[in-house]
Image: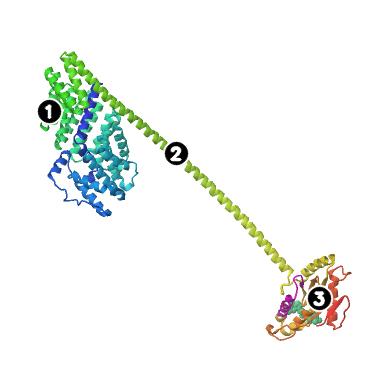
Amino acid sequence: MLAKNRLRAKVSIFIFNVLFLGFVSPSLLIFTSATAIGNHGSLHQSGSMASESNLSGMVVDAPVGITHVNMAQIEAWVSQLESIRLMDLEQVAVETDKLLPLLHQMPLVLQYRFVLLKAQSWAMNGEMKSAQKLLQTYLDKTPPESLIAEYVNLLVLLAGVYSDLDEVVNTLQVLNQIVPYLERVDDVNNEAYVYMLMVEMLSRMTRDQAAQQYTGKLYATLNKVIKPIRRCYISTIHANAVTNLIEHDINQRDHLVRLFTDAYHECELANDNGTKSINLRSLTHIYLLDNRLISAKKSIDEAYQMALADNNTSELGFIYVHLADIAKREGKLIKAEKYALQSFEIATELGTSILLIDASLMLSDTYEALDNTTLALFYRKAYEAASLTRMQDIKGQLTVFESAKLQLLDRERQLDLLEREKALYLAMKKMTDRTQTQMHLWMTLLIGCICFLIIWVFISVRQKGRYQVLAQSDPLTGIYNRSAGEYVGKILYRQARKEQRQFSLVSFDIDDFKNINDRFGHGTGDWVLKKIVAEINPLLGLNDIFVRMGGEEFMILLPDINEAAAWEKAAACRLALASMNTQYSGHQFSVTASFGVTQAIAPDHQLDTLVERADEAIYFSQMKVIKSDDDFTCVYS
Ligand SMILES: Nc1nc2c(ncn2[C@@H]2O[C@H](COP(=O)(O)OP(=O)(O)OP(=O)(O)O)[C@@H](O)[C@H]2O)c(=O)[nH]1
């Protein structure tokens, strides 16, 4: 148990050293936004390049006193700042501060690039909280497909910032957000950085199985990464992550030795003494697991020389623990005590809790071997206190992590539920829509049918009316034909009799009509018949019924009219015929008619009696015999 904790402590401090301690900002720069940053140097190169190059003012025209926004110019400034971000941190900080108020006026793509620049600038100046705040505002914005690469750069930087702030849970959350995008973006540097952070964070949370999953992915990136410093970090972190998983398997020791040796060579190519030393310490640890003292001694001596030369105190602290361990195993207890005390001193000075744990335990073991139980107990207690603090710290973080994970799961579950509800609602809506469409269809069909029926009935009734009119009227003149006239006349007469109202009748017969036909043709005869009707119609009242009895015989039924008025009407008709102009028939001739006028009297039970009397009157008229009595009147033509 202790051994495992010690190893984890070693791994964590190792990653801390590699990625953060002293190299906080450059570590972010190396792995984030490789395309935007370009191929500028490593941790150490970045420092030396800054001192070698004085590019300030050479590339960038400071946008002092911006009065109006010219996006093209701002984009040019951003591009220039991106190109010098590793060389002139100060100028980048100053210029991005000036551009910051214009952020929200920039198009989204430029916003993403600028935010990356500004947040990196803050991160490099140690203003982690400002960087985090700015990046956080872009975290929840779902990016358009075209800006996913820029969006991932921001997330990667945010993950780096959180890990710098030692906010493990937040780092993991951002990393989890990035992972689904990694394949779509295809940026090996971001990929490697994300997996490294993932392995480191999960290892810190003692999530070895989950870490293992990302260890494999991290190692796979090694085939694609070219830059030596990145290869150095990737192989080192990979070797440590694998160690976490298989260090107790004695058959795997050679494999681990190979991994650390490879990592050591990668770091040698990258000329990175710090990471090289870490690999040597890890090798020492593996050798000591098998008690291979000579190999262990050789490795740690090389690390010691390097740390001494580089004046790397923190690294020396860890090296002293190993030196003490080896000395103790060799039985050189005083020497072991000396190394362990040096280690303890550095741990106290730097406040490195993991080193404090290792140093305290080593001192306790050494004093125990020296039979100094008081000091052995003292350092054992120091060890336990430091371990407890660290374990509580891990436990606390683990709890936060677990509850965050649960919250995430709950949110996902809720989202899933919402999605299902949405799908259900859409399905139901689709069904309702379909039903409604069907209803509309049926309704339209029904209304269509009803309309059709109404129109059909209307047309039928009209047609029937037309047929009725056609059946009732004389086709040549348009007035009532004989049967219709007699039918209507009988009804009117019956009513008049019943109500004891006046009823008169005028009949007339065109004189010598046959002669007209014979002289001028049948067409002229027709014309005359129509012309007669046209001349007489205007002389009749609304209630008067004009009937063509057949051939050239006509009858006018006059309800509510007495004989005198009927006489007047007949006289008017006779006059109209006499003055009729026939020239439009194509001939000039005169038309006369013989009239008979009669009115209903008490004994006339039927209309026929009146008709007969009128016909008789016409006869007399034609005979030019004047006969006028109470019953009828002849009107001479
Ligand atoms: N052009 C035309 N002639 C018709 C029509 N109906 C009947 N007639 C003709 O009307 C003539 C009627 O002859 P008549 O009965 O002798 O009557 P009329 O010649 O007027 O002799 P009177 O009644 O004695 O004055 C016939 O020659 C019929 O052919 C019609 O619709 N059009």
Residue 71, x across and y down, in percent: 27, 53
- Please say whether residue 533 is one of the residues in the magenta stretch: yes
- Quote the CA–CA distance across marks 1 and 3: 151 Å
Can you say which quadrant of the picture contains the N terminus?
Answer: top left
Residue that carries the numbered disc 3 in the rendered image: 565
Query: Ligand 1: which quarter?
Result: bottom right
Q: Which residues are magenta?
A: 525-546
Q: Nearer the viewer, mark 1 or mark 2?
A: 1
Residue 432, x across and y down, in percent: 52, 45
The amino acid type found where label 2 is placed reads Arg
- Residue furthest to the bottom in view is 588
Toward which corner of the image does residue 260 lie, by quadrant?
top left
Residue that carries the numbered disc 1 in the rendered image: 304
The amino acid type found where label 3 is placed reads Ala
Q: Is mark 1 within 8 Å of ligand 1?
A: no
Toward which corner of the image does residue 132 lie, by quadrant?
top left
- Quote the CA–CA distance across marks 1 and 2: 62 Å
The amino acid type found where label 1 is placed reads Tyr
Mark 1 residue crowding within 10 angstroms, few (<14) / some (14–19) / many (20+): many
Which label is found at residue 420?
Answer: 2
Q: Secondary structure at mark 2?
A: helix
Between residues 486 and 170, which one lies in front from this camera angle? 170
Between residues 363 and 458, which one lies in front from this camera angle? 363
| Magenta segment main secondary structure | helix
Mark 3 residue crowding within 10 angstroms, few (<14) / some (14–19) / many (20+): few
Total numbered circles: 3
- Quote the CA–CA distance across marks 2 and 3: 94 Å
**Side of 13 relative to 603 (left or right):** left
Marks 1 and 2 in Cβ contact (< 8 Å)? no
